Structure formats: C-alpha cells, structure tokens
Amino acid sequence: MKLFYHDTTIGRIGIAENADCISNLYFATDATLLNVELQETSVIKEAFRQLESYLAGDLKIFTIPLAPYGTDFMRSVWIILRDIPYGKTASYKEIASAVGNPKAMRAVGMANNRNPIPIFIPCHRIIGSDGKLVGYRGGLELKRELLELEKQ
C-alpha cells in the first residue's frame, strides 16, 4: 500500500492507494497503518486533485476508483452513500431502508463509522432522523463545514 499526505483547506490529509484504487483517507487525528510506503502515485495525485477541486466547490462527483475494505453489509451501505447527491442528506433510517433492512440503523451507523474513505464515500451526508448532525470521524465541525460547502 502506498500513502501520501498533503495539507488541505481542512487540515492534513493522507490518502492511501492499493492496486490502483484509493483504499483509505486519513484525517490528521487518525492512526495510519505501519506497513505502508510513503509515495505519491499518479492515483493518489489524482485523488488529491479531485479532493482540492471538491473543497473549492468546483467538483460535485468523484471519479477516482475506490476500493474500501469492509464486510458485505458495509460495502452495500457505502455504495448507497455514494449515490446521495452533492448537497443532499439522508438519515440513518433512510439508508437502512435502502439496504433492505429498515431496522438496521445502528448497523448503518457502524458502517459509517468504519468508512475507510470519508469524503470520497460521503458519510458526512448522513444525519439523524431529527435533522441533527451526529457522529463523524473527522469531527462534527468538519461535517458541518462539508455540508455548508455543498449547500453553496
């Protein structure tokens, strides 16, 4: 696995690539894997280009190939998250229904929590049924910033 860091408008971000696909995004407070090679590959370079374009408000859909590692259920949640349009939100309950198990709201929450590629897989777009911001690995302030960016 290859990993490289850049300073962005939302802080220091690490992006990891495995087999020509983005596999992880790390916030400054995240622990990273030990067995990685620090190298900026062309795939990582493109991921940072797209991330910066997104953060500038110019990119609405990421096109970089992603390969998140997780259970079948987690991957099914992440696929649905990628279908939530830019500037829109959905509740945990709506995602649970979309994966075919309306009572699996906690499992959806766990899949969001374990999302290895936040922002690219937009778990920041998931909110509580009451419209409140809940849980985000990058912190609620960053979640609020990302949602505000998408409202513009």
Image (cartoon, helix red, strand yellow):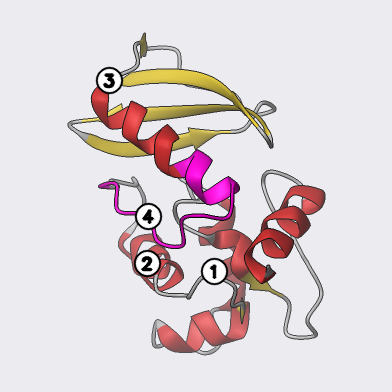
Residue 57 in the image: state x and y as whole percent: 58, 55
Of tags 1 and 4, which is closer to the observer? 4
Per the image, the residue denoted by label 4 is 62
Please, what is the three-letter code of the amino acid marked with disc 2?
Phe
Q: Secondary structure at mark 1?
A: helix
Nearest the viewer among 138 and 112 is: 138
Of tags 3 and 1, which is closer to the observer? 3
In the rendering, which numbered label is found on residue 41?
A: 3
Mainly helix, strand or loop, the magenta region? Answer: loop
- Magenta range is 51-65
First reached walking from the N terminus: tag 2 or tag 4: 4
* Residues tagged 1 and 2 counted as in contact (Cβ below 8 A): yes
Residue 23 in the image: state x and y as whole percent: 35, 38
Give the residue displayed 59% in from the left and 72% down from the top: 87
Give the residue displayed 52% in from the left and 90% down from the top: 102
* Residues tagged 1 and 4 counted as in contact (Cβ below 8 A): no
Please, what is the three-letter code of the amino acid marked with disc 4?
Phe
Per the image, the residue denoted by label 1 is 107
